[in-house]
Amino acid sequence: MNTQVFINLAVQDLPKSIEFFKALGYQQNLQFSDETAASIVISDTIYVMLLTHPKFKEFIPKAAAISDARSATEVLVSLTMESREAVDHMFDKALSLGATSFAEPIEMGAMYSRSIQDFDGHIWEFFYMDMNAAPPQ
C-alpha cells in the first residue's frame, strides 16, 4: 500500500473553502465530509481535510491554540504541476478565486514555482520540476 498524506487544515468558512478547492479542479469526497469537515482529493495519495475550528480542536490538546496562518507560517504545502504553464494557470486561477499571491515566482534552475495564500492564510505552492534539467544524483 502506498503511503497516503492527509493535510488537516482549520478553516473559518467551510463552504467557501470547499468551493475554492473544487474550482481549482479538485474533487470533494462526500463519504468523509459533513457540516464540520470536508475531504478534498488532490490525488490518489494526497487529501486535504478542511475542518471547522471546533472540529479541528477535537484533534489537538485542549491547551493548544489554532495558529493564525495569516500572521505566522504554519506549513508550506507544495503540489507538483505538469509544466510551467500549468503552474501559472493554477496560480492565476487561484487568484481569480480570491486567493492572494504569497511570493514572487521562484526559478531555481530546473524548478519553477508560484505561491498563494488561501482564505485562511494557508500557503500553497504550485511547482514544476524539469527532471531532464535537474542535476544528476
Image: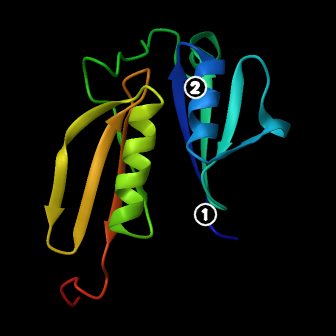
Judge by depth and name the residue closer to the eye, 134 or 36: 134
Judge by depth and name the residue closer to the eye, 100 or 79: 100
- Dot 1 amino acid type: Thr
Judge by depth and name the residue closer to the eye, 61 or 45: 45
- Drawn side of residue 27 relative to residue 34, left or right: left
All told, the count of numbered labels is 2
| For marks 2 and 1 on the same chain, the one whose residue lies earlier in the sequence | 1
Numbered disc 1: secondary structure = loop
- Disc 2 marks which residue? 17
The quarter in which the N terminus is drawn is bottom right
x, y (%) of residue 109? 14, 73
- Label 1 neighbour load within 10 Å: few <14, some 14-19, many 20+: few
Q: Give the farthest residue toward the right.
A: 31
- Drawn side of residue 103 relative to residue 52, left or right: left
- Disc 1 marks which residue? 3
Applied colour scheme: rainbow
- Dot 2 amino acid type: Ser
Tell me the number on the disc at residue 116.
Answer: none
Judge by depth and name the residue closer to the eye, 6 or 28: 28
Q: Residue at (82%, 36%) from the top-left corner?
A: 30
Examine the rendered structure and indicate whether residue 24 appears above or below residue 10.
Answer: below
- Label 2 neighbour load within 10 Å: few <14, some 14-19, many 20+: some
Examine the rendered structure and indicate whether residue 48 appears above or below residue 68.
Answer: below
Q: Nearer the viewer, mark 2 or mark 1?
A: 2
x, y (%) of residue 50? 60, 29
Q: Residue at (77%, 30%) from the top-left corner?
A: 33
x, y (%) of residue 89? 41, 53
x, y (%) of residue 9? 52, 29
- Drawn side of residue 83 relative to residue 111, left or right: right
Q: Residue at (19%, 39%) from the top-left corner?
A: 103
Q: Residue at (24%, 63%) from the top-left corner?
A: 112
The quarter in which the C terminus is drawn is bottom left
